[in-house]
Amino acid sequence: MSGGCRLCPRECMADRAKGELGYCRMPMEPHAARAALHYWEEPCISGEEGSGAVFFSGCTLRCVFCQNHEIAAGKVGKRISTRRLSEIFLELQEQGANNINLVTAGHFLPSVIRALKMARGQGLKIPVVYNTGGYEKTETLRMLEGLVDIWLPDLKYASGELAKRYSSAADYPARAKEALAEMVRQAGPPVFDDRGMMKRGVIVRHLVLPGCVYDSKDVLEYLHDTWGEQIQVSLMSQYTPLPHVRDFPELDRRVTKEEYREVVEYALFLGMKQVYVQMEDCARESFIPAFDCRGIQRPAGLEDR
């Protein structure tokens, strides 16, 4: 991409092709911090075999409570070529992954698209999951038409005030809703195989934050009223207060059982039927994977191309 970057709603105009770092803190070449089977997604994504998750470095959001802050801030990860990325997709398929799970890939989309096309030409057959914080441009998402099977966005907030305070993005609710509409258009209704694994569709994630039950209810009301059974919803209780939230004392605690239960009960009150919920023991740091660049480098003995 020549000129300034406009891939995400920030439109920071950094000349990333010449090595300038964008708002995402990344140059144009893909950087990733882990590529491995991942077992902690929704059951219809991970299954028993695992999801083939590629965790990309950098992020277009700066959520103060980020659970993957090491990679979101670009502190870890290695640069990889487009060809190597396509090889990673095929290696994960060979390991038995149920799908290829692109985690926060939006700021590297031109390279990711080329890698996906390359891998498909070499035998990639499993579904592709686009796993995103939801802060996307519809114009950018249209670049993925025909390449992504399952969309896995967050809808973090209904409130622009919360979005500004916690993610420096007051326009997040509007942008995320526009992006979701594009995802639903591309995916169509949910499709599952005979094992219950999703093959096509949209799952919207919402992380319940401490003290923000009112906003979670607004998110659920919007999803139910707008999309009904066209989407699945995943209500997450796994929020873990890490050291970097201490400047936001209201977030420096876990979500209580009562708070999470109130959100789940509101989903039931609305009549929502396609909702995933989490067990209480999910709110712990052990559910955060090690970003040790596993699976990123080419296996020893193979010629570097």
Image (spheres, grey):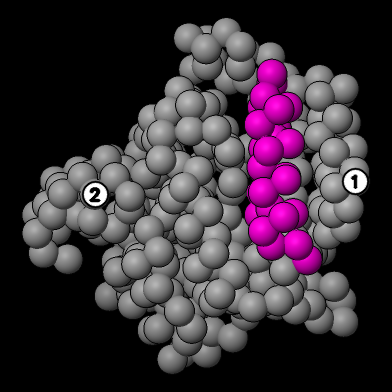
Mark 2 or mark 1, which has the lower sequence index? 2
Residues drawn in magenta: 203-229
Q: Amino acid at mark 1?
A: Leu
Q: On screen, 5 above or below 169? A: below
Label annotation for residue 268: 1
Q: Is 29 situated left or right of 273 in this image?
A: left
Front residue (pair 6, 213): 213
Q: Amino acid at mark 2?
A: Glu
Q: Which residue is rendered at x = 38% and y = 84% of the image?
A: 118
Give the number of the mark in front: 2 or 1: 1
* x, y percent for residue 37: 65, 60
SS for tag 1?
A: helix
Q: Which residue is rendered at x = 59% and y = 46% of the image?
A: 155
Q: Is residue 217 magenta?
A: yes
Label annotation for residue 11: 2
* x, y percent for residue 14: 15, 47
Q: Is residue 287 visible?
A: no
Q: On screen, 191 above or below 292? A: below
Q: On screen, 124 above or below 97? A: below
